[in-house]
Amino acid sequence: MPSFSQFGNDLYAGRRGLDVMRTRRVWYAVAAVMVGLSVVLLLTKGLNAGIEFRGGSEFRVSGVSTTAQDPAEAAVRSVVPDGQPPLISTVGDNAIRVQTEQLSQQQTDAVASALAKGYSVPAGNVTDSFVGPSWGADVTSNALTGLGIFVLLAAVVLALYFRTWKMSVAALVALVHDVVITAGVYSLSGFEVTPATVIGFLTILGYSLYDTVVVFDKIRENTEHVLSSGSKTFAEASNLAVNQTLVRSINTSVVALLPVASILFIGALLLGAGTLRDISLALFVGIIAGTYSSVFLAPPLYVQMREREPDIARQREKVLARRGGTAVPTTGSTSAVSAGSGGDRGDGTSTGTATAVLERPSTRRTPRSPSGGQRSQPRRPGGRRR
């Protein structure tokens, strides 16, 4: 069985690989289904916004003998029976966090006393904090502003670096794909969206953009002289670039996912470090979604936009016609180009305006000279004997 390194060498040399460009409809469909499901979840279930965004009161009870949520809910209901249901979560092995709607100072003191009584802990073990709705609105506004500035700067930098807006558009579509899917997973899991989550979102956008730029840079390298090539189309050269960077994308993603998975599954779920779940889930989902979009979404979309350009479309028809052995008129000339013709220099360009004809092997015998040897035949201009 070939090793993974041999597999990577075969991908880079083009001896094997995924035909991403030809099967792009499949990858588009997978991305559309995932994005569609995420949008449905966001519209129906929504996000569990943290107290930093929606405002309210938060209580933390430490040193409890039980992490059951019933005493906390009963304590809040005893003070505000008609209020919104509290959000109760376990922090570690012996602490409870309770988040409620905005309470007055009198109600806050009453809830803190009820929590201490319900969990049989001293009053000093119950701490409370308050976040006003205006502060939460400012946090939300700043988060959206930061996200918008990041996307705008990324679009401008990509357009300037690659000297084409089409790569910038393809990369932005990949970024939107990553953000929507990550937000959909947050909605499905019910994890709180906190400022740490926003930091995680910006981190995965940077990771996805970095991975996409690496693939695009290889595509630009492979397609730099594709118009003068007669061996590969633009899509084939781009597909080779995707396969050449595939192993690197997989290795980078696996290395990045290992510590994030440790934080998410070991630190957050097993050890109960609830504050780590916000950023670790965003990183875990975002890295996977970013790897997918960098390989299977952004490159095919960019190639699809470029294939509509007249020069690239003509080059593609010329290459495919050459492989099929049919003549195709060249631009601005009445000459024709054919596979195996003498008018091809080997680099895919025509050698003048002479018409090249696909020759078939002759069935006539070659006349011999009187001396018994084969008669020398005069050479044609293309280098073949008559």
Image: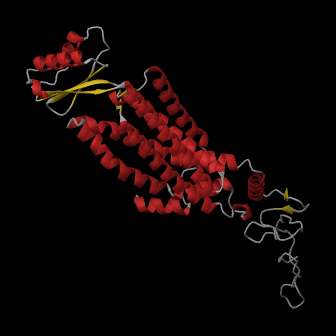
Report whether 226 appears left or right of 49: right
Residue reaching furthest to the top: 82
Q: Position of residue 107 (x, y in %)?
A: 23, 15
- Compared across the picture, whether 52 is left or right of 39 comes to left
User: Can residue 31 be seen at all in this image of the molecule?
Assistant: yes
Instruction: Please tell me which residue lies in front, 225 or 45.
Output: 45
Which residue occupies 52% across, 48% down?
Answer: 294
> Residue 71's spot in the image, x, y percent?
16, 16
Mark yes or no: residue 20 visible: no
Q: Position of residue 245 (x, y in %)?
A: 50, 57
Q: Position of residue 295 (x, y in %)?
A: 52, 48
* Quadrant (top left/top right/bottom left/bottom right) for the C terminus: bottom right
Residue 196 figure quarter: top left
Quadrant where the N terminus sits is bottom left
Q: Quadrant of residue 231?
A: bottom right
Point 40% across, 34% down: residue: 139
- Farthest residue to the bottom: give it: 371
**140 on left or right of 72:** right
Q: Residue furthest front?
A: 105
Residue at screen point 56% across, 60% down:
14
Name the side, left or right, on which 210 lies relative to 98: right
